[in-house]
Image (tube, rainbow, N blue to C red):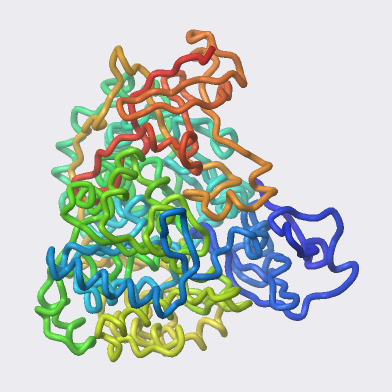
Amino acid sequence: MATLPCSAESLIEAYGPHLNHEPPGGFAARTAPDRTVNTHCCFCGQQCGVTLAVKDERVVGVEPWEEFPFNQGKLCPKGIKRYLQNNHPDRLTRPLVRTGRGFAPIPWDEALDIVAERIRRIQLHHGRDSVAVLSGASLTNEKAYLMGKFARLAVGTRHIDYNGRLCMVAAGAANLKAFGIDRAANPWADIVATDLVMVLGSNVSECSPITTDYIWRARDRGARLIVVDPRLTPIARTADLYLPVRPGRDAALMNAILHAVVRLGGVDEDFIAQHTTGFEAVREAIADCAPEAVERLVGIPAARIVEAAELWVQAPRTMLLHARGIEHHTHGVENVLSCINLVLATGKIGKPGCGYATITGQGNGQGAREHGQRCNQLPGGRDIENPAHRAHVAAAWGVTESDIPGKGATAPEIVEMIHRREVRGLLSICFNPLVSLPDARFTQEALERLDFFVAIDFFLSETARHADLVLPGSLHEEDDGTVTSVEGRVIRIRKAVEPPGEARRDWEIVCELARRLGQGERFDFHAPADIFDELRRLSRGGVADYGGITYERLDRDMGVFWPCPTEDHPGTPRLFEGGRFGHPDGRARFHAIEYRPPAEDVDDEYPIILTTGRVVSQFLSGTQTRRIGPLVAQQPEPKVEMHPRLAARLGIADGERVRVVSRRGAIELAAHVAATIRPDTVFIPYHWPGAQSANRLTIRAYDPIAKIPEFKVAAVRVERVA
């Protein structure tokens, strides 16, 4: 696992004009920081505790926050270098307006007036829903809540969604369907106590390195490990059983494993009868899914599928973990439900060391999907189409129920609407769709068709380069707030420094825009704590109930697990204890799943499967990590990972340039020939833009329920470049 032990003395670096590159000498040898601030990493959903060192009002170093219970003194390569972005020369410090020759500075008041005037003008001519808002899953809970309220009350549009649509929504939809609540069922400490860990579609060693430590500690206790992935990732190399599933066939594999479990007599009939509904339909649906019948489809010998079932049945306690590898599909929700079926059928949930969890991807991937910035959601995880939920929120906001717009379009659908000129104006924050959405050429065409586009960001991302106005916002460590970690633990983000130059905190920008749009009295917040107090009041009684969580409790207890309805409630680290689930009748729901093929499968013209994902040194669209020198040096460009048999058939040697072509575009990269991937599949990481963008190749095809894109399967051909 890529974790680095460190100390303040070894990590507080000299700062100067090239802070994105670490100097050879340590700063602490000559001086000491003015202060240190305990907060959390700005990257993935693990939200590890970090201690930032501040000197002369600049963040100059980082070390693990040793006392924080999740990472316990460990950080990954991204976390240990995160501070090097803070004083990067690309940092936006003044509002910018597009001119005939690029961007030029503009005063704040003039910039904000332009935004308000252009929004009003577009809506006057094309209707209120002609302006959309795209937000982000790395925002704090306060800002995520604020964006939903801002879009619906200040802008008055129903079209708001967020980049978690590319990450967590398949798992979220499946969790709600099966459990009635969308959160990891167990704290990560339960991983250490289990007897078997099954990891599906998650390269934890690179994407969630601290989670790897939990798995290793379980293995030190004697736990077994099953890994399902088309690539032999670092965690898969250590597995007791590795199942190299063919991309897009996950539901078929899980049905076959459950078929074998039934055949082995491993079903917990008492648990099913007392705590669930719908199993008979599942039993019927998997009747024809014997391992022998699906082995060719999934690309795994029947004997290994049966072995997985045997290991699962024999283990007294099991933990099933999954991530984007099974979710980024046109049947992502069904894939997740097929995993949940296995957990429920064997009654292995709601107990110490025994349960189920989705590994959250983005920094606040859990909390940001709970409090109203999704197109179908109001604060507290409420349903925007439920009249009672709408009435509750309307009363709290001091508006009528009809003043709250209805369900809007998802982020990919908004881009499609922009392309069709149905949406004419866009406000975006913490979202880089030109790199992160599939079929990048289509996204670029859409951005170029906007009448008006304003972006709030701290770097000029590839998407922001298409904006008419860019408003400089704040980094993670330049504001207070809360986030909710992969475990469902609400934790505190603490401000370490002020935004540089004329940059402003994001919530201040949004509230000022709301005032200019005539809604100032409803956005009269003076600090993030004010926003959080309103958020927790509105969430009370909802699915995601933060009612009893306060900043004081978070500071004292290093976090509180929701649901936490009252201030004297201890929080809920483990869900479903006692067998009661989140649905009104207390029962979990089985869902009969039938395998559906991917939207685009291989053929004679495009005979190879492309799958995409992350690498350890980069994060999401790379807006931050591609500006951190040591991370850039670790992997300066993407490569095409391919099996030696495929490389030999195509006449390609390791390191040679190859062209990867899909029906949507082509890119040229170096080949990385390694026996760590299926021979019928190639892998390209997606953190790079432009001519290196994997999303020039991916397909605009979406899950019908969650609308998550199918990033994990596209048909391509690979050609050697002369």
Q: Is residue 525 left or right of residue 53?
A: left
Q: Can the viewer see residue 149 in this picture?
A: yes
Task: Indicate the quadrant containing the C terminus: top left, top right, bottom left or bottom right.
Answer: top right
In the image, residue 93 lies at what x, y percent? 55, 69
Residue beneath the point at 46% across and 76% down: 107
In the image, residue 200 lies at what x, y percent? 42, 41
Q: Is residue 662 above or below residue 698?
A: above
Q: Is residue 715 above or below residue 704?
A: above
- Comparing 439 with 565, the one in front is 439
Residue beneath the point at 32% across and 44% down: 443
The single residue placed furthest to the front in the displayed view is 100
Residue beneath the point at 49% across and 31% down: 231
- Comparing 282 with 627, the one in front is 627
Q: Is residue 181 left or right of residue 493?
A: left
- Comparing 701 with 244, the one in front is 701
- Comparing 63 with 241, the one in front is 63
